[in-house]
Every structure is written in C-alpha cells, then in structure tokens.
Image: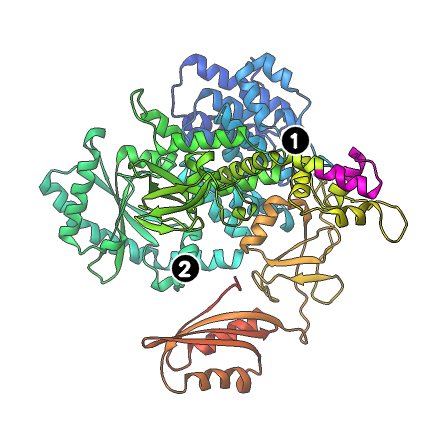
Amino acid sequence: MDTILPDTYSKEEKEEIERRHQLLIDAWQTRKEAQDLAEVDEAFYFAVEAHKDQRRRTGEPYIYHPIEVATIAAHDIGLGRTSIICALLHDVVEDTKYTLDDIRQKFGDKVAKVVDGLTKFDAMDDAESIQAENFKKIISSLSYDTRVVLIKLSDRLHNMRTLDSMPKHKQLKIASETAYLYAPLAYRLGLHSIKIELEDLSLKYTNPTIYENIRKRKDEVREQRLHELHDFAAPVMEAFEKAGVKARTVIKERSVNSVWKRMMDKELAFEDLYGSFIVRFVTDCPKEQERIDCWKIYALLTNCYRPYTKKLKDWISFPKANGYESLHAVVMGQTGNWVEVQIRSERMDEIAEKGFAAYYKYKTDNQTESGFDEWLKKAQNLISNDSDNAIEFVDSFKLDLFSDEISVFTPRGQMIPLPKGATVLDFAYSIHSEIGDHSIAANVNSRLSQLDQVLRTGDRVEVITSEAQHPQEKWFEFLVTATAKSRLKSGIKEYRRTFREAGERKYEEIMQKLGLEASKNHRNAVMAAEKLSSSVDFYYQVATGKIDERAIREVLKPQSGSGSIVRYLTFGLLGGSSKDKEDRPSITSSGEFDFNVSSCCNPIPGDDVIAFNFPGEPLQIHRSDCPRAIQLSARHGNNIVKAKWQPKSEIAFLSELKITALDTAGLLNRMTNLLSNEMHLNLHALHMEAKQDLVEATLSLYVHNTKELDDLISKLNHLKDVQKVIRKNSN
C-alpha cells in the first residue's frame, strides 16, 4: 500500500490530512481489528490520490470533506468499517476520473453499490427537478441498504457546517432543501443530534437575524439557568440515592431552531418560554427493568416537585416511529418556573441520540417489530409503488413518512399509526383498498362520523361500508396519506374501467352522427383538449355524459373552419446548470422586474427575502424562512435568483399584527390614534374580539419597511393595557 501523500499537497496540508485521518480512526467505535484497519487505510489513501488535484471553495484540499464525512458516520452515527470506506469514497465516481467499475474491482460489490447510491445524477434537461431526482435516488436505497441514507446525512451535515463559503443564493437553496428534506429524514431515522444541528444550520442561513438574536439570548441566560437547574436536580438525586435508584443527571440545551419554533407556536417571547433548557434523568438498569425504574424516577420526582399533569407524555409505552422512548414531564421548580424533565434508560438515551445504528445494536432476534421497523416497511412500500415523477415522490414521502404521528385503534384494539391530520378515509384505506373504496361513514368512539373527520390519538374507529358506494375524485380533497391517495387513484381507475364498453359504444354513435371516423387520432385530439391522459378516463366521461356530442364537435369541427387542432406545449424550468450563477440579477422593489409579493408571508423591505423565477410568471418574492419558500427551494432550487430590497419611500407593503390586551375602555382609541395621528400609517383592516377580560386584535396595515414596523410594534407594546404584539403571516 502506497502511503506517501501526493506532492500536490503542501507539507502543512499533508500533516493536517494525517491528523484528520487519525481523528477518524479514534472516532471509529465499532470493531477495529487489523484487517478492518488495513481496509479503511486502503480506502483512505485511494481517496487522497483520487482527489489530489481538487480544492474546495475555501482553497482547502477537497479530501478534507470525505474524511470529515467518514468521521461523522463513525462518531455521530456509530457506523463501522464498510460505511467508513464508502464515506471516504462517496465523491470519487462523481468528481474524479475513477469509475464505478474501478471501485467494484478494488473494494467489492457491496461498497460499489453504496457508492453508486451516493453518486448524484448529472444535470438532465428534461428533469422537473434535479434535486428531487437525487433525493429520490437516495431514499430508494432504503429498499436495499440504509447505509446510503446514513452516509448521505453525514455528507449533508458537513456541507452545512462549511456553507459560509457559498454564495447567498446557494446557501438558501441548500439550507432550504436541508430543512425540508434532510432534517426530517434524520429525525425519522432517530438521529437526534444530527437532526437538531441540521435544523439550526438551516435557520442560520434562511433567517440569520432570528438565529443570531436567539443564540445571543441563550448565551445571556445560560449561566443562570444552569445554576438554577443544578439546584433543582440536587434534592431529586438525593431521593434517588435513598431509594437505591442508579441514575445520572444531564442538563440539555434546546437548539436555537427548537426555541424559535416554540416561540412561534406558543406566541411567547424568549423570556416567557420555559423548556429552553431540559433536565434529563438517565437510569442504568437492565432492559427488563427499564419501565419500572423510569416510572419510579417519575414518582420520586413528583414527591419533590408538583407536576403539570397535562404535559406528561409516555413515549415508553408508545414509542415513536423512529424508535424514540422516554417519559416527558413538566414540574414546578423552586424558583417558580416550570422545568421540563426527560426520564429514560441508558439504552433509550443511546437510541435517542444515535438512532438507527444504536437501535439495531440492541435489537434481539425474538424482539417484536418496533415503530421503526414499521416505518422502514412503509418507506420501502412507498418506494416500490412510487410514480415516475420525482417531485410527486418527494412530496408523498414527506407527507406520509415525515409527519408527526397519531395512534388510532380498530374495534379489536389493533393500533394503527397515521400521520397527524389523517381522516377517517385515510384510516379506511390503511386497512384495505376495498374498505376504503366502499366507505360511507364510520363510528368514531361510538359516534357516527363522516369520512372527512380528522382523527386524534386514542380514537377507536369502526368503518361503515356499502357495496353501492364507489371511489370518488372529491375524496382527494381530504386525504392526507400518500398510501390512501394511491389506493384511491387505483380504485377510481378500476371503477371507471367498468364503463369502457358503454363509453366506446357511445363514442362511435357520436362520431357517426358527426360523419367522422371513430379513430385513435380523433380520440387523442379530444383527450388533449379535455386534458385527459388516460383512455379509461375518456371513455368513462363519454359514458357518463361529461364529454358529449357538443364537446367533441367543438374540438374536431370548430366553427371557425380552420380545422386546426390546439397544440399543447410544455416548457422546462429555467436554470438547470450545475455551475454557480453568481451573476444572477438582483431583484429590487423599484419596478425593474415584474414580481409578486407573496401573500403567504407578506415580506416587506428589511426582511431577508428569496425570489423564484418560473417561466411565463412574475417573480415570486417570499421571506427566506417562509415554509412555502423552503418547500419551493427544496423542489426548484435552480429557479432561485438573488433578491434584495431597494426600498422606495412611496411604496407601502401590507403587514399583519396580532395584539393581546386587557379589555379596557379607550383601548381602540389609543391604538388608532397611534396609527393615524402619530405614525401616519394606512390601516387596511382591524378585527377585535373580547374573550373574558382580554381582547385579541388582528391588525392589517401598510408599512414601508421592517424598521417602521418594529417602531410600531415597540410603541404598541408601550400602550396602556397592551400585553403582547407579534407579527404574523397571513396564513
């Protein structure tokens, strides 16, 4: 084995490469026998040689990247020899002269297959989204080797850690794609630490102002909160010692992104938010004793502090789909603040942090399948039944397999996991296609309910069916799961096939009346005009009268006498180059470009914004952290253009505030006086509703920039009896 590093590296770089090599070996936690070490070293020096002429944007040797990816896979996920080799080689086929056959010949079929799964597609002119195609390829590896996904997550994490060197529009594209697809994927695989770091890094680039503000606030309170929580844990640990419970205390800091989500969900300021720091009690006990010891810890905890019983969550009796197990409790601490507590075993803690790899480390042959096994089966089933459209596949995968879950029960007590927001009809199709196709209603907790009723955890559902019922297109409006939508689509097609003979007969009768041949070309022309892609749908619509003689005549014998058939043109997306487009135009608010300010987030000058350029449409301007913008970035990253505000003082933008205040006389007058007389702002709409002693007001008004809006929020907060003012999205 040639261990001499190429001369394309400087002396200092060679030393750094060897230092990182040693850190990788030290991070490797699984078996490290002589043969294993030799094989990893062989892959290491092969990768060093393959990437010797490549540099990253920072000027650093490119080989740093695969070494760091392999280190993350080894340390953060706990993967072993084969995965480390694949991580070191993951960019060789894509970026160097070496081919997949070279990898196969030198390292074997298993390594070659994983590396192939990690190799991106080349840019494709006819691909709706190259991002979606590559994500689909990565996810499809779940059907044959989960190591592809785990190494890809390691790759994505290192790319996010080094994103500073990329141009702004690239940062937004990669960060949005990470938040939309890769962080939820890490969560579903139980990789908690990777998931929270991906989310934090995504927020850092999609909303840097919010990220920095929350990070600084956490820094300011950290010392005080740690001191308070150590004092909080002390009497509990004393109680453990007296009761003979073996446990350790960990104080965990909630991530910036998690704090921000909680602030938004609860509409609270940082100071009013409990749970930005968490106390975790981890017990060291045999697996068969875990449940007893965890509940014993809860009993001892609540002997010391009063619990908030509605906040108790039992993820031990009902583990999450990603294998996560823990008791979550909230208790009142000695300082008068609520404290969030997690209780788990050492095994549960390792699975919570390292997910997939740790789960299989502890799994025994006779162990029943967990939620993670069920999730993996659902993923593999979705992969095997997916459509050719990559974007549809990604949306279905996210909808079905990334959503938070609920657990509902059949009449016989079988637990059925479903995505949050799932309806009675989703439940029916999850049982069987035939049940879904013939559903007419259901008894939910012994009460008659319609098919579109949204289910909740704990519901007991008994579906009512009828042979006279048939699947209907309008059902798509309230289905949530991709499985149900796929089965409904198949059911509709099968039902419509029963009309084919009648449709063909009626079509021939119409064409005979019009004096035309009932040819395939004529049929296709009508199908194009009606935007139908299937002859099954065509004959169904003819049989049921939705396509009649008049409709066919208008297409085949138009009154204008031109005799021409409408041509339907399909345009591809703009962009598509893998090269960075650093010279993309900047979009300003001066009217130089035709653009729409999106109503989903109502961006105003001063906000970080992102623009999307779609053929034949005005530019779409969103706030960069808008959920819709993140979705568009993940699906259509090549359509991002650089965007910045160049505000004009005469242009005003609609914004919306939510105000909570005490219900006192003169409140409305004080608010309108501030708006009209003091700040001279144009009010668009005002809605106020009294609830007991409080008033909730929604205020829509026109402002010129974020500074003006911030000034208004500050002045509203200082008005007498006003309790809270927040900016909100319109939907």
- Is 513 inside the magenta-drawn segment? yes
- Is 455 inside the magenta-drawn segment? no
Q: Is residue 159 left or right of residue 544?
A: left
> Within the image, what quadrant is residue 336 found in?
bottom left
User: In the rendered image, is residue 161 in sight?
Assistant: no
Give the colouring mode of the picture.
Answer: rainbow
Residue 197's disc is none
Tags 1 and 2 touching, CB below 8 Å: no
Cα separation between marks 1 and 2: 40 Å
Residue 533 coordinates in the image, percent (x, y) = 69, 39
Q: Is residue 306 left or right of residue 122?
A: left
Above or below for 89 versus 317: above
Residue 391 coordinates in the image, percent (x, y) = 61, 40
* Three-letter amino acid code of the residue under disc 1: Phe
What residue lies at 45% left-to-right and 17% top-to-bottom?
Answer: 37
Quarter of the figure with the N terminus: top right
Q: Which residue is mark 1?
A: 121
Looking at the rendering, the stretch of residues picked out in magenta corresponds to 506-525
Q: Residue furthest right?
A: 562
Residues packed near mark 2 inside 10 Å, few (<14), some (14 to 19) or many (20 plus): some
Q: Which residue is mark 2?
A: 263
> Within the image, what quadrant is residue 186 found in?
top left
Seen from the viewer's position, the closer of residues 167 and 589 is 589
Above or below for 514 versus 696: above
Q: Is residue 33 left or right of residue 249?
A: right
Seen from the viewer's position, the closer of residues 83 and 666 is 666
